[in-house]
Amino acid sequence: MKVGLAAAVTAALALSGCGSPSANNNSGGGGDTSAISTQQNALDPTAKGPAAEVPGAKKGGTITVYSQSTPDSFDPTDIYYTDSGEIAKLIFRTPTQYAVRDGKSVLVPDLTDLGTVSDDKLTWTFKMQSGLKYADGSEIKVEDLAYAIKRSFAHDVFANGPTYQLTYFKDGDKYKGPYTGGDTYAGVETPDATTLVIHLAQPFADLPFYLTFSAFAPIPKEKDTKENYKNNPVASGPYQFDAFTPGTELKLKKNTNWDANSDAVRHQYVDGWDFKWGQEDVKTQQQVLNSNGPDANALNYAPIDASLIPQLTGDKKAQLLQGDSPCNYAVNLDTRKIPLEVRKAIAKAYPSDQIWKAGGLNSYVAEPSSTILPPSVPGYTKYAPLPDLSGTGTGDPAGAKKLLEAAGKVGFELSWYYDNTKPIPQQTAQIRADALKAAGFTVKPIGVTTAELRAKIADYDAPVNMGQGPSGWCSDWPTGGSWFPVLFQSHSISDGISWGLLSDKELDAKIDAIAALPAEQATAKWGELDKEIMGKYVAIPRYYVKMATVIGSNIGGGVGDGTQGEPFYVDMFLKS
């Protein structure tokens, strides 16, 4: 998943080992692990509208939302960043959706049920609610869901949207969307007014989770304006476009044709939303914390700047909105080039606490990690960290050197890329080099420019053996199916998305077997596999990202959406 642009800056810097660019204070390497709990609930097929009332909720007023970064698109087919994806939940309904319960995300029916799958796992049937309307009063038809699916294949027009359907959907490698491929597509059919049938090329147990993407929001064919649709899309959710200045501001107003009784997730408490982009984050975060006048009804969705954390005392503590994120960061170890015993020595020597401190991380925006799955993903299991894989500690060079001596590998060369144009990556690269050198390794850090870094770490044939990308991963949906098949199968190497660069046919088969199970059966098995793969020492865990944003003193109903790492707007209201 692509993180929102503000968080993308954080992620880009994290690639070079420096952590959050706006976090200048730190709480040491430990962080607060008490907040992490096992995530088990994955779905509730019986959920129905209306959504449960938020305690104390009132109606009326407008919430203002600030961010320095600008969402890339509001065309539902082209949305793949977390910030626009969260805002889209106010505007669009999808076949399925997430409710937030006790801080955890649960898959529930939205426009359709959660579907039933055929015995051969290649055909899914979804039953759609009838009698629902768009903001303009026209009927939402099952054919509009089918058209949205067809439209999602038009990557020549919508290049940024998700691409899983190209692999999993029948003829997804051939069909190019309705503009060039026509309306006839073998992967979807609508046999009657309330039935959507999706045909697959291979089993895809997580399809109901994937259908939460805005790419599957209904679009009436006759109102599709292609590239211009993003400027005034047809709304099916509780709010619709009122005024839009691309790159600067989006005002939403109520969709009076939205039916609360049919929606198990969303509310329509406020009269409108005013999203303002391009204003400096620290400035607007300070305004929100001050909550003078209209800023009491405002929030900023970028991670809180560390310079403002000392202000979070007294009544202002309640203005920090915290929650899970779908992201985890680690340092890749190339298992093709580094033997297991040497990987264990790297883990023992690794100076996690020093790098945490130098990178400016703090317990508000990050949590030391010791697993593959982050806490927001069902299947996450907080097992006892494997030796030297807790994401914490100052390192044990002497102990690491003993491991190298026992393996006959003293002097083993370790090499990685780092950004040599910025002080923090330079500092963290030096900390890493000093610790590994003290453990008996030969080290060869390779400095490159910011512009070169992303391409260099993505080249798996490059002359390095650790620190390759991706250095972080975020769930596209909250199951292990968005992690293990993507990062740890043999094809992950050729896909350019691998942690550890594993090529293990036995592991491939194990992942395929779990991925083919229904989500409720796969959940626990993903947790077991997590520990098994960590035991291969494929990466040094760094940190789970945590959501920490500021909200005005008059905003109620604030919770985080762990599937996006963003504020869950659909529950918010104004207290007065």
Image (spheres, rainbow, N blue to C red):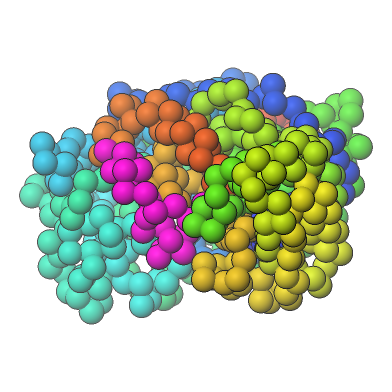
Q: Nearer the viewer, residue 552 or 404?
A: 404
Residue occupying the far left of the picture: 191
Query: Is the C terminus in the top left, top right, bottom left or bottom right quadrant?
Result: top right
What segment is highlighted magenta in the picture? 489-513
Determine whether, in the image, residue 339 is placed left or right of residue 389.
left
- Taking 174 as reference, is 353 above or below it? above
- Taking 435 as reference, is 394 above or below it? above
Number of marks in picture: 0
Residue 76 seen in the figure: no
Determine whether, in the image, residue 192 is placed left or right of residue 64.
left
Q: Position of residue 65 (x, y in %)?
A: 68, 50
- Taking 455 as reference, is 196 above or below it? above
| Quarter location, residue 249 | bottom right
Measuring 84% from the left and 36% from the top, which residue is drawn there?
28
Measuring 86% from the left and 40% from the top, which residue is drawn there?
26
User: Is residue 116 one of those drawn in magenta?
Assistant: no
Residue 165 seen in the figure: yes
Determine whether, in the image, residue 158 is placed left or right of residue 410.
left
Determine whether, in the image, residue 239 is placed left or right of residue 523.
right
- Taking 513 as reference, is 524 above or below it? above
User: Is residue 512 one of those drawn in magenta?
Assistant: yes
Q: Position of residue 553 (x, y in %)?
A: 78, 34
Measuring 73% from the left and 65% from the top, which residue is drawn there?
444
Q: Position of residue 463 (x, y in %)?
A: 60, 71
Measuring 42% from the left and 39% from the top, which residue is drawn there?
480
